[in-house]
């Protein structure tokens, strides 16, 4: 057999490439018997080990097959053929044919696309008031890297296998302990389900509790990510208007059919920023008991509160097992850490865990281990205290700049908590918002209208202003530019 060793590199690789070329070019046809390793070794003047290694690689990649006592033969079906895309047939439908989609997929396609709130700042923007972004420069990177390195060095075979769908047990314990201290929630660790961010928590809750056609109460306005989860599940939305104190339980639907679920953001209503007082929280729980409904409490940024006494979480007041509590680490640590949690009544936990298992099996274990260490060692709450102080200073700078630059021309809502506020502009209607946002972008200013969060847009113009990711001097400079854009928009209206 004539074999030329191809290319450079170790001898066994050169022999492997030569034999592979002979097979692919048809010089060694399907089923052809290869020379023995001893014979080929003598013929080519190579060590038998080099020939054995070349044959082993051909065998491992599927180019040849070994038969005990008979030798080595070219495979009947080559791996390159199996990897070649199928060209189709004359009967195949044209590429433009519409696929037959499920009802779920059709509902998804019909939804308006939601821009990611945590995306990178817009290109060319000097001052981006994008909401939902924490100040990643405030994060204790060195502490996190040290914990991460220690866990990576100590990684065992167990930590490299599949983890439990409900989450890493020490992290569930750490979350339960933290919520007991910070939010008055006394649920056991067994009621905590670790998820890939709060968005997955909303999706799992909808899958477990909502059937197509069920009524779901949502706030008006409402977080788009939640609203679209319910619409994708086939729910019929029952919007309930909010005021400066959040959702008013007196306006919740009382007739048939009963709502299956009510989605609320009581600690800092999104996007208006209202904080639901204790009386309304208790009324909401009484409504849920009468309606045999569940309350889905999204506590997305309750860690940041600057005025007044913190109000107990709705879940902490629940005595009848009607509240599912959602939290996330995206707003307080960094968004790419896709870890959140869902605290649920015990009877719902098995179904929620089963849904989590089907969705993605489990949340990555290494990150959970590091986060558990970060919380248990006190680093999480030390970071929170520093972040509260720095965000309070940013908030104060933003409020003062709005007063100085715009005065009574702007009405601020939701500034006593969270990491964004809502600025209503007097003298501007909703129709002026697209031009205002465009002028802002042309001037290097990122502005975000509140209208997408309403099912029925308000008449007056409002923009959300996130401040956690901007320095105080940038907040002041950004507001000066914002005031110029607002005045130009008012003069053109």
Image: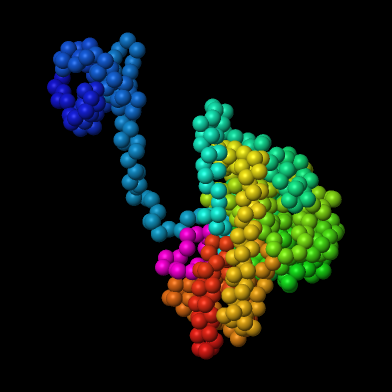
Query: In the rendered image of this protein, does residue 354 appear above or below residue 316?
Result: above
Residue 175 image-quadrant placement? top right
Query: In the rendered image of this protein, does residue 379 appear above or below residue 93?
Result: above
Residue 312: image x %, image y %? 78, 56
Residue 434: image x %, image y %? 51, 77
Q: Identify the magenta region.
A: 112-130
**Residue at left 85%, top 50%?**
319
Residue 406: image x %, image y %? 59, 81
Residue 314 image-quadrant placement? bottom right
Q: Is residue 351 left or right of residue 40?
A: right
Residue 473: image x %, image y %? 52, 69
Q: Nearer the viewer, residue 467 or 213?
A: 467
**Residue at left 82%, top 58%?**
285
Query: In the rendered image of this protein, does residue 159 appear above or below residue 292?
Result: above
Query: In the rendered image of this protein, does residue 251 appear above or below residue 38?
Result: below
Q: Nearer the viewer, residue 422 or 305?
A: 305
Q: Is residue 34 magenta?
A: no
Residue 364 image-quadrant placement? top right
Q: Is residue 123 magenta?
A: yes
Visible in this render: residue 113? Answer: no
**Residue at left 16%, top 17%?**
44
Q: Nearer the viewer, residue 152 or 3?
A: 152
Visible in this render: residue 439? Answer: yes
Type of colouring:
rainbow
């Amino acid at each position: 057999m004539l074999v030329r060793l191809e290319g450079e590199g170790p001898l066994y690789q050169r022999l492997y490439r030569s034999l592979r070329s002979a097979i692919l070019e048809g010089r060694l046809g399907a089923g052809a018997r290869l020379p023995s390793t001893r014979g080929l070794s003598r013929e080519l003047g190579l060590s038998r080990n080099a020939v054995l290694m070349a044959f082993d690689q051909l065998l491992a990649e599927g180019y040849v097959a070994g038969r005990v006592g008979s030798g080595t033969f070219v495979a009947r079906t080559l791996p390159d053929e199996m990897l070649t895309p199928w060209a189709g047939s004359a009967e195949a439908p044209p590429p433009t044919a519409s696929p037959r989609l499920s009802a779920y997929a059709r509902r998804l396609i019909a939804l308006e696309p939601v821009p990611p709130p945590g995306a990178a700042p817009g290109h060319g923007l000097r001052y981006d008031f994008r909401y939902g972004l924490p100040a990643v420069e405030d994060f204790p990177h060195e502490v996190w890297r040290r914990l991460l390195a220690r866990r990576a060095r100590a990684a065992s075979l167990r930590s490299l296998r599949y983890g439990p769908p409900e989450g890493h047990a020490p992290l569930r314990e750490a979350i339960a302990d933290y919520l007991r201290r910070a939010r008055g929630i006394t649920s056991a660790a067994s009621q905590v389900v670790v998820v890939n961010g709060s968005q997955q928590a909303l999706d799992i809750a909808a899958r477990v509790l909502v059937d197509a056609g069920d009524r779901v109460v949502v706030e008006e306005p409402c977080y788009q990510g939640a609203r679209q989860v319910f619409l994708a599940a086939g729910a019929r939305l029952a919007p309930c208007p909010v005021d400066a104190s959040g959702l008013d339980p007196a306006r919740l639907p009382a007739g048939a059919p009963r709502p299956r679920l009510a989605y609320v953001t009581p600690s800092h209503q999104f996007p208006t920023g209202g904080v639901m007082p204790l009386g309304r929280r208790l009324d909401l729980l009484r409504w849920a008991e009468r309606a045999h409904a569940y309350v889905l409490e999204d506590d997305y940024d309750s860690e940041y509160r600057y005025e007044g006494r913190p109000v107990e979480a709705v879940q902490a007041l629940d005595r009848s097992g009607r509240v599912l509590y959602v939290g996330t680490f995206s707003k307080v640590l960094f968004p790419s850490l896709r870890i959140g949690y869902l605290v649920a009544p015990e009877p719902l936990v098995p179904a929620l865990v089963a849904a989590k298992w089907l969705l993605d099996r489990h949340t990555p274990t290494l990150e959970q281990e590091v986060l558990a260490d970060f919380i248990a060692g006190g680093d999480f709450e030390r970071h929170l205290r520093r972040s509260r102080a720095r965000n309070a200073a940013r908030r104060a700078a933003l409020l003062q700049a709005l007063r100085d630059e715009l005065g009574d021309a702007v009405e601020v809502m939701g500034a006593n908590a969270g990491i964004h506020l809502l600025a209503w502009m007097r003298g501007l209607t909703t129709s002026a918002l697209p031009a205002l946002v465009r002028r802002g972008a042309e001037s290097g200013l990122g502005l975000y209208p509140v209208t997408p969060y309403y099912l029925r847009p308000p008449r007056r113009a409002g923009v959300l202003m996130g401040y956690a990711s901007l320095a105080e001097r940038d907040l002041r400079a950004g507001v000066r530019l914002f005031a110029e854009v607002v005045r130009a928009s008012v003069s053109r209206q």
